[in-house]
Amino acid sequence: MYKILKAEMLAENIYLMDVEAKRVAKSCLPGQFVIVKMDEKGERIPLTICDYDAEAGTVTIVFQIVGASTNRMAKLKAGDSFRDFVGPLGQPSELCSEALEDLRKKKILFVAGGVGTAPVYPQVKWLKKNGVDADVIVGAKTQNLLILEKEMEEVAGNLYITTDDGSYKRKGMVTEVIKDLVQEQGKKYDVCIAIGPMIMMKFVCLLTKELSLPTVVSLNPIMVDGTGMCGACRVTVGGEVKFACVDGPEFDGHKVDFDQAMKRQQLYKTEEGRAYLREQEGDTHKGNCGN
């Protein structure tokens, strides 16, 4: 059993939990995820690691209520436990494999949308710890849905916050902030890392491609099973079939077929749609990763 040490609501339908998971905490790197299960009959839920403390043996997760299972999970309190807490899974952020002396020469821009702020935070924190400052844009629909602002302020080189409705800081989409920084202020970046809703990542990539700014995206939003067995996170990247849970979750954003991925996600929501995808995709529906 994995004890919940802290449970709090960050915003409407968005929750944070600190979980005692010593072996997971010792092996974590930014960009990875865990799979949690509340009880013997519970659904397996993949969640991005928001933070971790190897010495304390804790892992922080952030999740949004999107269905029955996450609604049940939101009712858990400090002192309750998860039946399973498996990880770390997925590939770590590409930044973790680069030489620190090279990273410190780079100008890095992060773009976080909504709950995507959670997986951006550990990457920026890791960079700060290793002497690398990164600029961060955080976007939310409204001020009430903004999360981890204080935590991000402590680790970001420069933090830019924007809300769709203008209820906090500046008004507008994250793409408008990118345009302002690059085209108006003349800032130059070596790489952009975008994490958030699929539609946000799509339009960030369309813009950064115009700006000739290499962009990495994290396809956490399309994962369901988390081990490659369900085929939900099948995506085409540069003409090749990939699976976000085992090949990613990070990919070259300029090579991702976002339109296909978003259309596929809509089909995957129904049993009829899943049957159609299995028939159309054949052996590539799941690949060999789940076998």
Image (cartoon, grey):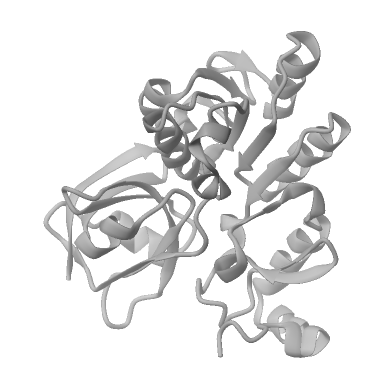
Query: Can you give x and y, in whole percent of width and height, for residue 271 in the image?
Result: 65, 82
Question: Residue drawn 52% across and 50% down?
Answer: 97
83 w.r.t. 74: above or below = below
* Number of on-image labels: 0
Q: In the displayed structure, does residue 280 sit left or right of residue 252?
A: right
Query: Can you give x and y, in whole percent of width and height, for residue 121 in the image?
Result: 44, 37
Relative to the observer, which residue lies in front, 81 or 195?
A: 195
Relative to the observer, which residue lies in front, 183 or 278?
A: 183
219 w.r.t. 44: above or below = above
Question: Residue drawn 72% across and 23% down?
Answer: 178
Q: Quadrant of the N terminus?
A: bottom left
Q: In the displayed structure, does residue 202 sit left or right of residue 106?
A: right
Q: Quadrant of the C terminus?
A: bottom right
Q: In the displayed structure, does residue 252 sit left or right of residue 207?
A: left
Query: Can you give x and y, in whole percent of width and height, for residue 126 in the image?
Result: 41, 38
Query: Can you give x and y, in whole percent of width and height, for residue 269 in the image?
Result: 64, 71
Give the residue furthest to the left. 79
Q: Quadrant of residue 278?
A: bottom right
240 w.r.t. 66: above or below = below
Give the residue furthest to the right. 210
Give the residue furthest to the top. 185
Question: Residue drawn 78% across and 56% down?
Answer: 256
Question: Residue drawn 56% across and 67% down?
Answer: 245
Relative to the observer, which residue lies in front, 162 or 155?
A: 155
Q: In the displayed structure, does residue 96 sit left or right of residue 5?
A: right
